[in-house]
């Protein structure tokens, strides 16, 4: 079979993929869980939104393929077929649910969700017709979107994303906005019930779309103007931007309130952990799956040294912190030595084992007098600086922010240092790195030790934040989560870690309906990333180059000075 | 005293006895070649000399300094630099980054800049392509890069492992021409080759390696005349 006959109906294959996704989403219960909340009150629930946006996205891909292969007509056809095929699969599911009791095997296949799929119609035929029509419309919308010229397309996309995002996050955004005095009235206009008000949604869409269009048209000019500034002016601008950023970071917990500050601290801890693991995995290329061990060591060191419950020591947090980091570093070296000769898969398995050993040690009964056993260790005191206590999330935020800034600064300096170069060589080819004069043992141990130190630091902060430590806080899933964060963000990239932590840790915290489906979402996100953006959300230069080699080779990269000179009048 | 003295080296892979008492000497300014069939132990010898493999007994000396037990990254600092078999450039880094990596042991910036100029003078092609991702270079260009990278490390002696491997005949001529120019500019070279004919043309002396032992050694010109060498390595009858 050749490619032509395989895809006689454009968009059919992607349509079936899309339909399979939608059926899966429906059957695992995520659609129903989401339909409690609304994106636009009375118009679109979050469950419907999930189906709609998934279908829209895949139909967009189908239209995109069609357009590349054979032009406008084919793009439109592909979009329509894709949307219709997806809806047809859903319709089949509904019919199936009427014929047999799916619930016996699929406990989430509730009648309510099927009722939702047929738009709550009593007459099945009408409902199914509506469903198919909705599929066609979605496909048409996707194709239409693809066929728009770039600027309006970007504007519409931005508007949609903004409306969907704010609608979904209504229950966190609304309380915050309504506490901001003058903005409160505006918030009441935009939000309504459990979602956006219809008027608010339209207004938001228009504003965002306009903003995006403006930036698409004028962004280059603005950037050009900035590039054309005198060095002094540019420095001023940069200082201004930094000052603004610092101010925002400083007032963030007050502005966001208790709940969002708590979310921020969790994201912050993952950023800390991610920056550490990024050194090991991203810079030096050593796949470490036992990373949580150092987090545990940091936490337990602080717990043992400070908690009156065990009564051995009663240091303050600040006195215990250096020990926590030191023990983390030592543990990093101790783990590093036996695995020096291992690569790839073997290294991953060995480190995975190390992580489990630490968890089982702290869980063990025989070490209970010293490590607390399954009950863990409680009464860990809060950190304090000259009378300011890092008590609640709004205060701990500053502790974590300071940690992130410190660790971010260190890894940034390390990356561009001699050691950073050695890591890069080790990552690319260990044998040749040695032959270039790089001390392999030192480079690897330093990577393990630095990463472990950062991990222990976040563990220490974690211990004082929670006030107690339990073995079950340190299971292998933490290591996997951190790895996911850096993969999704872009391996080796520091901004990527931040983006990844917000996407994979922050969002699920905000959408608590997600909590149950967290792993599903991680899996889907990873697969989607590998297919659509394998280099990560905010990739590091080397990886972007590798994965987009052919695109980059298309044109010679102009010399920077030459381009700057040409851009100036 | 020879510049590089390898004496009675025995190297093992586990209990495979790969080098069975090998002695090789290279004088300053020479090109010395080692020829031998697949699996004779040529690469093993170079890796042992550059510290990547540790010999069970025997000694390696450079300008009289004992290097036998040094780890590879220190051997590089002493001036023995290897161009590995199969080039092994850093495929995801740019040409310039690769060259930069070669200069890892040397933190004198002016020296590095001079070396870079030298490499670019030797291989103008690399200068044109300095921002290109090295993995996308052609085979010949990759070999130039591998040589350039090694030169960045200020070698006293360059160990080259089959530089002509996998290259078209036209390119092979170019590579050997470059090796000769390098040597004329003062670099001492120990060259391992399958292409015995070319190797014996540019080398002053040669060693014939068979099953981990030196069969014999002689001036290159005489080796090329030798009956056994002609039959076994030059494909003549
Ligand atoms: N890592 C290894 N483990 C075990 N045996 C090895 C290893 N590397 C090489 N050998 C063996 O040592 C012997 C010498 O190998 P070497 O690579 O030095 O040969 P060579 O002369 O370079 O061959 P070629 O011309 O094919 O490159 C061979 O028998 C080979 O199988
Ligand atoms: Mg070889």
Image (spheres, coloured by chain):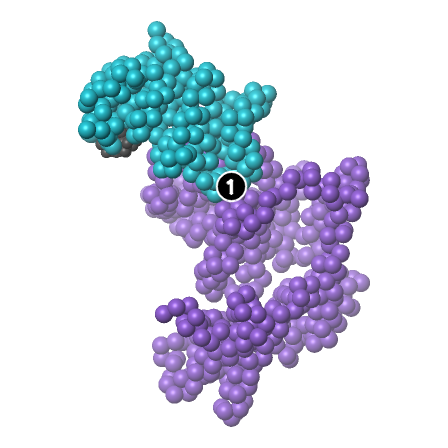
Q: According to the colouring, which chain is purple?
A: A
Q: Is A204 left, or right, of B159 in this rendering?
A: right
The location of residue B165, given as percent across then percent down, is 35, 34
Would you name the residue on which mark 1 appears? Answer: B133
Quarter of the rendering containing residue A563:
top right
Q: Is A186 left, or right, of A344 in this rendering?
A: right
Which residue is at 25% across, 28% downward?
B234
Q: Quick check: B204 above or below B125? A: above
Q: Element type at marker 1?
A: loop
In the picture as drawn, the residue positioned furthest to the front comes out as B237
Foreground of the two, A93 or A256: A93
Q: Name the quarter showing ligand 1.
A: top left
Which residue is at 63% across, 57% downward?
A260
Image mark 1: chain: B
Q: Quick check: B59 above or below A475? A: above
Q: Is B11 left, or right, of A375 in this rendering?
A: left
Q: Quadrant of the C terminus of chain A?
A: top right
Chain B as rendered: colour:
cyan
The location of residue A154, given as percent across then percent down, is 66, 63
Quarter of the rendering containing residue A358:
top left
């Amino acid at each position: 079979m050749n490619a032509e006959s395989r895809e006689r109906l454009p968009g059919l294959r992607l349509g079936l993929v899309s339909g399979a996704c939608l059926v899966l989403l429906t059957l695992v219960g995520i659609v129903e869980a989401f339909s409690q909340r609304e994106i636009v009150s009375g118009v679109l629930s979050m469950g419907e939104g999930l189906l709609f946006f998934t279908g829209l996205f895949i139909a967009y891909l189908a239209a995109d393929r069609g357009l590349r292969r054979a032009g406008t007509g084919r793009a439109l056809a592909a979009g329509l077929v894709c949307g219709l095929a997806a809806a047809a699969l859903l319709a089949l599911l509904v019919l199936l649910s009427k014929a047999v009791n799916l619930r016996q095997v699929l406990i989430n296949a509730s009648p309510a969700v099927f009722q939702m799929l047929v738009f709550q119609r009593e007459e099945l035929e009408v409902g199914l017709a509506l469903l198919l029509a909705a599929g066609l419309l979605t496909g048409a919308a996707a194709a239409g979107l693809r066929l728009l010229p770039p600027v309006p397309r970007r504007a519409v996309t931005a508007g949609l994303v903004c409306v969907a995002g704010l609608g979904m996050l209504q229950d966190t955004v609304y309380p915050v906005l309504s506490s901001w005095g003058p903005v409160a009235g505006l918030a009441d206009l935009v939000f309504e019930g459990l979602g956006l008000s219809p008027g608010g949604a339209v207004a938001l869409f228009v504003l965002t779309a306009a903003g995006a269009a403006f930036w698409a048209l004028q962004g280059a000019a603005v950037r050009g103007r900035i590039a054309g500034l005198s060095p002094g002016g540019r420095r001023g601008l940069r200082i201004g931007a930094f000052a603004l950023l610092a101010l925002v970071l400083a007032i963030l917990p007050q502005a966001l309130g208790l709940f969002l500050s708590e979310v921020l601290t969790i994201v912050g801890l993952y950023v800390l952990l991610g920056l550490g693991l990024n050194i090991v995995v991203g810079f030096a290329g050593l796949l470490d799956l036992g990373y949580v061990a150092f987090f545990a060591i940091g936490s337990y060191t602080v717990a043992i040294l400070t908690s009156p419950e065990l009564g051995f020591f009663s240091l303050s947090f600040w006195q215990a912190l250096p020990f926590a980091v030191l023990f983390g570093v030592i543990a990093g070296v101790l783990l590093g030595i036996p695995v020096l000769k291992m690569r790839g898969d073997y290294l991953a398995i060995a480190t995975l084992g190390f992580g489990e050993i630490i968890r089982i040690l702290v869980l063990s009964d025989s070490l209970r007098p010293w490590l607390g056993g399954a009950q863990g260790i409680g009464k860990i005191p809060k950190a304090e600086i000259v009378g300011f206590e890092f008590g609640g999330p709004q205060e701990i935020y500053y502790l974590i922010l300071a940690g992130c800034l410190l660790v971010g600064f260190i890894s940034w300096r390390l990356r561009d240092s001699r050691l950073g170069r050695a890591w890069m060589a080790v990552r690319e080819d260990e044998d040749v790195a040695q032959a270039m004069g790089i001390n392999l043992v030192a480079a690897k141990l330093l990577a393990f030790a630095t990463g472990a130190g950062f991990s222990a630091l976040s563990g220490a902060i974690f211990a004082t934040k929670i006030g107690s430590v339990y073995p079950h806080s340190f299971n292998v899933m933490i290591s996997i989560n951190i790895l996911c964060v850096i993969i999704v963000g872009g391996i080796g990239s520091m901004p990527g870690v931040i983006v990844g932590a917000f996407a994979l840790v922050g969002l699920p915290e905000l959408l608590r309906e997600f909590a149950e489906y967290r792993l599903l979402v991680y899996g889907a996100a990873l697969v989607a990333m590998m297919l659509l953006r394998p280099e990560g959300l905010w990739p590091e230069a080397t990886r972007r180059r590798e994965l987009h080699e052919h695109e980059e080779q298309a044109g010679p990269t102009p010399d920077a000075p030459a381009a700057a000179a040409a851009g100036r009048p | 005293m020879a510049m590089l003295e390898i004496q009675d080296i025995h190297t093992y892979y586990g209990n495979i006895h790969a080098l069975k008492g090998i002695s090789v000497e290279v004088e300053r300014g020479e090109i010395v070649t080692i020829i031998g069939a697949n699996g004779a132990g040529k690469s093993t010898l170079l890796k042992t000399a550059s510290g990547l493999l540790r010999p069970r007994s025997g000694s390696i000396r450079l300008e009289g300094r004992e290097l036998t037990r040094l780890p590879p990254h220190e051997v590089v600092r002493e001036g023995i630099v290897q161009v590995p078999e199969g080039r092994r450039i850093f495929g995801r880094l740019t040409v310039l980054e690769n060259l930069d990596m070669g200069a890892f042991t040397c933190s004198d910036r002016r020296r590095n800049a001079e070396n870079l100029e030298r490499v670019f003078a030797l291989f103008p092609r690399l200068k044109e392509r300095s921002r290109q991702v090295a993995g996308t270079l052609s085979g010949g260009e990759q070999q130039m890069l591998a040589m350039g990278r090694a030169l960045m490390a200020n070698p006293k002696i360059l160990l080259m492992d089959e530089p002509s491997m996998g290259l078209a005949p036209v390119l092979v001529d170019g590579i050997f021409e470059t090796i000769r120019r390098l040597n004329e500019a003062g670099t001492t070279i120990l060259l391992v080759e399958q292409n015995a004919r070319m190797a014996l043309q540019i080398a002053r002396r040669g060693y014939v390696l068979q099953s981990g032992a030196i069969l014999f050694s002689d001036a290159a010109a005489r080796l090329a005349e030798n009956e056994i060498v002609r039959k076994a390595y030059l494909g003549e009858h």
